[in-house]
Image (tube, grey):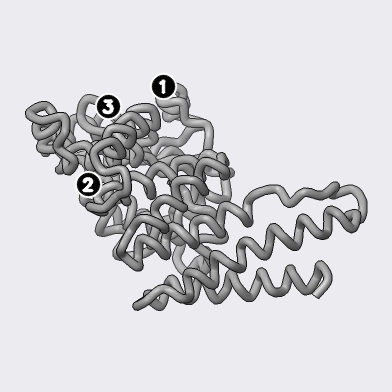
Amino acid sequence: MQKNSMRTLVALAIVASAATALGQIKWMPSFQAALDHAKETNRLVMVEFYATWDKNSQNLDTATFGDKAAQGVANKFVPVRVNVDKEGKDLAGKFHVTNYPTVLFMDKSQKVDGIIDGFEDATEFIKHGNSFLQDYADEPAAEKKYKANPKNLDAVARLGAIYADRYQIAPALNKLAEAERLDPNNASGKLTDMYSNIGDYYQNASQYEPAVKYFKKEAETSKLTDKRAYGYLSIVACYFSMDVPSDPNQAPTPEEVKKIREHFKVLRDYVKTTLALPNLKKEDRDIADQDLNQIETLLQATGG
């Protein structure tokens, strides 16, 4: 689940060699060996599909896996690397992997329980890796509660968030519909993670309009500053990624300039709303400040 670059503001400072970074993770010698070890230990397998010629794969191995905290998370799984141009070619086809790097987290039966599609920095990798571990631990109890009582909001919301985390969007949306019938205004706050994870799914699929819809629900219905900030800043990231209405081959018309300015004014409003949140974390404030500076620069460039 790779976040937009405007959201994470990744700065790649490659400070270690790939060999050193990779050496800190206990990689298994083959995919089959990883599966066998997963069966023995009841742990998830972490499969990194990479290409030696791909810069993002190289950055994942050096910048992300060179981070000690990220290495610690990776070692909670059974990690294995497969080269999509060699031994991993057929395996990549089996799991429909076409983007590099892709990291799949799967159980011993090869059921995919988490996906990282593309490069992520150490902070995002740690967040998602721990999230997948928690999903794996929580799913059996949530399924049991749901079977006992399909109107158990805790179970419905948790399963919906898990499905969205795994890019299983149809069952995630089904669970969201169930949860919204039980709690239409998110008064419990239990739907927030569903909104966030579904928004992440659509954003990573470059479907920005539905992503904005769910991030708005997260930001506008949650009572938690962290969740609201994530929703608003993710909306800004989506707007930055949307096509601004103009023809790139010629100077924009006055009407197009007006639309461009309206586009950036919407972004500015969301950023200012974020900055006004109580007890905003420093990292979120820093992202919002950087976004605001960029927006003001773009507005000035389109007419002051």
- The Cα–Cα distance between marks 1 and 2, rounded to whole angstroms, is 23 Å
Label 2 and label 3: CA atoms lie apart by 15 Å
The residue labelled by disc 3 is 110
- Residue 42 lies, in percent from the top left, at 13, 36
Identify the mark at residue 133; answer none if there is no mark.
Answer: 2
**Dot in front, 1 or 2:** 2
- Mark closer to the chain start, 2 or 3: 3
Residue 89: x and y, percent? 47, 26
Q: Please name whichever residue, 254 or 130, is drawn nearer the observer in this view of the structure.
A: 254
Q: Amino acid at mark 2?
A: Leu
Q: Check disc 3: other Cα within 10 Å, few if <14, some if 14-19, many if 20+.
A: few
Between marks 1 and 3, how big is the CA–CA gap? 11 Å
Q: Considering only vertical position in the picture, is 10 above or below 98? A: below
Residue at x 51%, y 60% (from the top left corner): 7
Q: Residues within 10 Å of mark 1 (few under 14, many from 20)?
A: few
Query: Marks 2 and 1: in contact by CB < 8 Å?
Result: no
Residue located beneath label 1 in the image:
94
Q: Amino acid at mark 3?
A: Gln
Disc 1 marks a residue whose amino acid type is Lys
Q: Left or right: where does residue 209 sit relative to residue 277?
A: right
Query: Where in the figure is residue 292, as x and y percent of width and height?
Result: 60, 73
> Residue visible at 44% across and 46% down?
214
Determine which of the numbered discs, if any, sits on residue 124 in the image. none
